[in-house]
Image: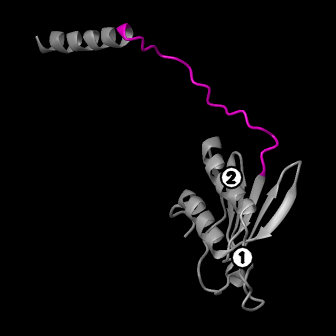
Amino acid sequence: MQRISLFSVFILSAMLLISCGATPGLTNLTQDVDANLPVYTYLDSDGNTYRISPNKLIYDPASAENTTDGIKDQGYHLELNISLNDYSKIAATCKKQFEISQEALPAANTDFVIPQLTRKNTEFDETIELSKTALQDLNYIIKPFLKDESF
């Protein structure tokens, strides 16, 4: 008797889904990417480099010899696939940095890295030095992608 009731529930659920227009379909998993979208390269204050393109986030950590403190472990090289939506979020923050006035962080001595942001595509190739606020904005949007994998 229980088998019949379970089967009845399954049939009724299937009929309900079909009657409301739910049908299985194919999803296009490929993303058409504009070839002229800029590629951003962010050099943070620790000497780590982040390359952001429409489908990939590449993290190149500073080596122990090249860090500002010489001690802090900066993690491992990572290449992460990101969605076009994720790229758009990061790119919007990067673009904002080029549109606002930056008060570049002064180098206290020659051992410190001056943080920079570069954007390149067929129309432009430009680099700016970043302020403390810009570093906070960029770290806030980029670091969650690295999670615990890099530190």
Above or below: residue 29 compared with residue 101: above
Looking at marks 1 and 2 on the same chain, the residue that comes earlier in the sequence is marked by 2
Residue 27 included in the magenta stretch of the image: yes
Report the mark closest to the observer, 1 or 2.
1
Judged left or right of residue 24, residue 129 is right
Image location of residue 143, percent across then percent down: 57, 63
Residue at image location 65% in from the left, 47% down from the top: 88
* Region of the chain picked out in magenta, as a range: 19-38
Q: Which image quadrant is residue 20 in?
A: top left
> Looking at the image, which is closer to me, 37 or 30?
37
Image location of residue 94, percent across then percent down: 69, 58
Q: Which image quadrant is residue 26 in?
A: top right
Amino acid type for the residue under numbered disc 1: Glu
Residue at image location 65% in from the left, 57% down from the top: 93
Judged left or right of residue 52, residue 126 is right
> Looking at the image, which is closer to me, 113 or 9?
113
Residue 91 is labelled as 2
- Disc 1: which residue: 103
- Magenta: main secondary structure equals loop
Q: Secondary structure at mark 2?
A: helix
For disc 1, the neighbor class at 10 Å (few under 14, some 14 to 19, many from 20) is few
Amino acid type for the residue under numbered disc 2: Ala
Q: Which image quadrant is residue 120 in?
A: bottom right
